[in-house]
Image (tube, rainbow, N blue to C red):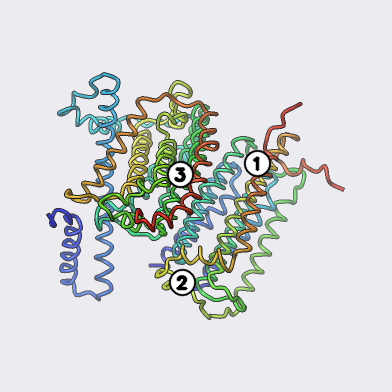
Amino acid sequence: MDLIVFYLFATLAVIAALGVVALRNPVHAALCLAVVFISLAALYVLLSAPFVAAAQVMIYAGAILILFVFVIMLLSPGVDQGAGALKWQRPLAAVFGLALAVELILVLASAVLPAARGQYTPERLAQIGDVQAIGALLFTDFLLPFEITSLLLLVAMVGVIVLAKKRVRS
Amino acid sequence: MIPLNFYLILAAALFCIGLFGALARRNAIGILIGIELMLNAVNINLVAFWRYIKPAGATMDLAGQIFALFVITLAAAEAAIGLALVIAIYRSRDTVNVEDVNLMKW
Amino acid sequence: MDLLNNLFVNLYDWLAGALHALAAGLNLVKDAENAIVAAVMSLVVIVVLLLWLVLMVLVLIWLERKNAARIQDRVGPNRVGPFGLLQPVADTIKMFIKEDIVPTNADRLVHTLAPIVVAAPAVLAFAVIPWGKGMFPVDLNIGVLWVVAVGSIGTIGIFMAGYGSNNKYSLLGGMRAVAQMVSYEVPQVLTIVAIVLMTGSLSLNKIVDAQSGWGGMQWYIFAFPVGPIAFIVYYLSALAEVNRTPFDIPEGESEIVAGHHTEYSGMKWGLFYVGEYFNFFLVCTIAVTLFFGGWQGPLLPPYVWFLIKVYALILLGMWIRMTWPRFRVDQLMGFAWKTLVPIALVNIILAALATPILKAIGLI
C-alpha cells in the first residue's frame, strides 16, 4: 500500500520535474512546479512528517509559486526561444546533469548507511505531537539558527522592498 | 516499509533535473525555478534521513525535519530576493535573459 | 435525547459493525477484513460528506438570493417550488445542459483544469471539521494547518483560470484575486496563531474541547481582549479570502466583467460558483470552530448547534455583502497590510501575555 503511494507520487514528481525543465512556456513550467511541490508534500506525509508536509504546501505552493507566477506575468518573458548565443549550453547542461546522476547512483550503490534510530521515532512523535516536539527543539537546541533565520527573513524583506520598489524621480 | 534508497534515488533524480534546468535556461526566472527544484530534492533527503537513520555523530534528533523547515524558509527568502533582483534588472535593462546581463564581465 | 445527540456516531458504528459481520462471512484474514471495512467506511464518509456539501451549497445559493432580495426590497426567486426552494436545483440542471465553450487561443489544458483546482481543495479542507460530538471525518493533529495549506492551493486555480482564458479581463481578475488572497491569508493565519497559542494545539477537535466549560463563557470569542479582536480580523480577512463583497474586486462586474471566470460557461463556470460557496461555508465553519465553541451548546444536538452557529455567521456575511460598496484595489491592499496585519501581530503578543492570566481566572 505504502509502496503504491510512493510510486504514484514519486513518478508524478519526476514527470512534473521534467516538465519544469522541458516546457518552453514559463507559466506551464511554474504550474508543473506546483505539481512537484504537492506530490513531495504527499511523500512527506508518507514519511510521517505531516508538519513539514503542511509547511511545504503552505510556503512552496501557497507563497513561493505564487511569487513566481506573479513575476512571470509581470515581466511576461515569453516563450523560451531555442538556442541563443551559447549553442552548446543545453547539451552541456545535460552532460553535467547526467554526470551528477551517475555520480549519485554510484554513491548510493556503494554506501552503507548506519541503521541506528534516534529518540524521536514517528510513534513517539504521534504521542507528544510533532508540532510540539519541533517547536520545543526550535526554541532550545536550535535557538541560534532559528533567530538567525528570523533575522535573515527580515533582511530579505527589507532587501526585496528596496529592490522592487519603483524609484520616484526627484 | 519503503527502503530508504527509494527516497534517495528520487531525491537524486530531482536534484539532477533541477541542476539541468538551472544550467540550461537562459531565462533568469527559469534558473530560479531550477534552484527551487534542487532545494526540494535536498528536503526529501533530510526528512527521509530523519525517518530512517540517525546521522552518525548527530546529537540532536529530529534535526532532519527542522533542517527541512529551515530550508523551506530560506527558499522563500531566496525566491523573494531573486525575483526582486530579476524585476530590478528588467527595469533597468528590459530583459530577463541572463546572457544579456553581462556588464560585469571581465 | 442521548440517541439523538449521538445519532450519526451511532449510525457510523452500526454500519461498521454490520460491515464487519458481513466481511466475517468471507473468512478472510483479520487484517484484510479490517482493511476492507476501513476502506468502505471511508468511502461512505466521503460520499456522505460530498452530498452534504452539495446540499449546503444549494441551500446557501437559495438563502443568498432570498436574502439579497429581502434587503433590496424585492421578492427573489419564488417560481420553482415553495418559496423558490427548488430554484438552485433548476439552475444546476440548466448549468449541466449548457454549452461548454473554450475560447480560441486559450490554453486548453490550463483552462479546463482551473475550475477543478479551485473547487477540489475547498472540499478537501472539510475533512478535518468537527461537525458534531465525535463527528469528524479525520482528526489530524495539524488540523488548522491542513485547512490553511489546502486553501492556498485554490489560489493557483484562480491564477490558472485567469491565465488560461486568454482574455485581458480574466488575467486582470486573476492577478487581482491572487494578490488579494495571498495578502489576506497573512492576517487570517496570524489570528489563527493567537487561538493556537491559547489552546496549545493545532487539532480542531482539541480547540473545540478547550472551549467546553462555563456554559459557553469559555468560547474564545469571550476571551477578552484577544478573542474578539482575533474574530473580527479573522472574519474580515476570511470574507476577503473568499472574494465576497466588499472585497470582490477580483470579479467586480462594473470594472472587469467577471474577473477570472469571464470566459467560463456551463459546468466549468458552475464549479467556480460552487467552489466560491464551498469556501464561504468553509470559512464560516472554521470561524465557528475556532471562536464559537464548535458544536457545543445546551439542549439541542451538537450538530444542530454547529449548523445554527454557522448559518448565523453566513447570514452576517450576506448582510455585509448586501450593504457595503466595493473597495478600490489600492484601498484593499492597504487595508490588509496596514490595518489587519499590524492588529493581528499585536494580537499575537497580547495572546502570549494574556493566556496565563486568562487561564488563571478560568476564562479559557
Residue C41 in percent (x, y) is at 25, 60
Residue nearest the observer in this picture, A103 or B82: B82
Q: Is residue C345 above or below residue C209?
A: above
Q: Amino acid at mark 3?
A: Gln
Label 2 marks a residue whose chain is B
Question: Label 1: which residue?
Answer: A80
Question: Label 2: which residue?
Answer: B2
Task: Name the residue rendered at 66%, 57% in the picture.
Answer: B19
Label 3 marks a residue whose chain is C
Q: Is the residue marked by circle 1 packed among few (<14), some (14-19), or many (20+) residues within 10 Å? A: some
Q: Is residue B10 above or below residue C328?
A: below
Decide if residue B62 is on the left or right side of residue A84. Answer: left
Q: Amino acid at mark 1?
A: Asp
Decide if residue A151 is on the left or right side of residue B10. Answer: right
Question: Label 3: which residue?
Answer: C188
Residue B24 in percent (x, y) is at 68, 51
Decide if residue C65 is on the left or right side of residue C252. Answer: left
Q: Is the residue marked by circle 2 packed among few (<14), some (14-19), or many (20+) residues within 10 Å? A: some
Q: Amino acid at mark 2?
A: Ile
Q: Is residue C152 above or below residue C41?
A: above
Q: Work out how far the residue at label 1 is from the one at label 2, CA to CA, in angstroms.
A: 39 Å
Task: Name the residue rendered at 59%, 66% in the picture.
Answer: A142
Residue nearest the observer in this picture, C100 or B49: B49
Task: Name the residue rendered at 26%, 47% in the picture.
Answer: C306
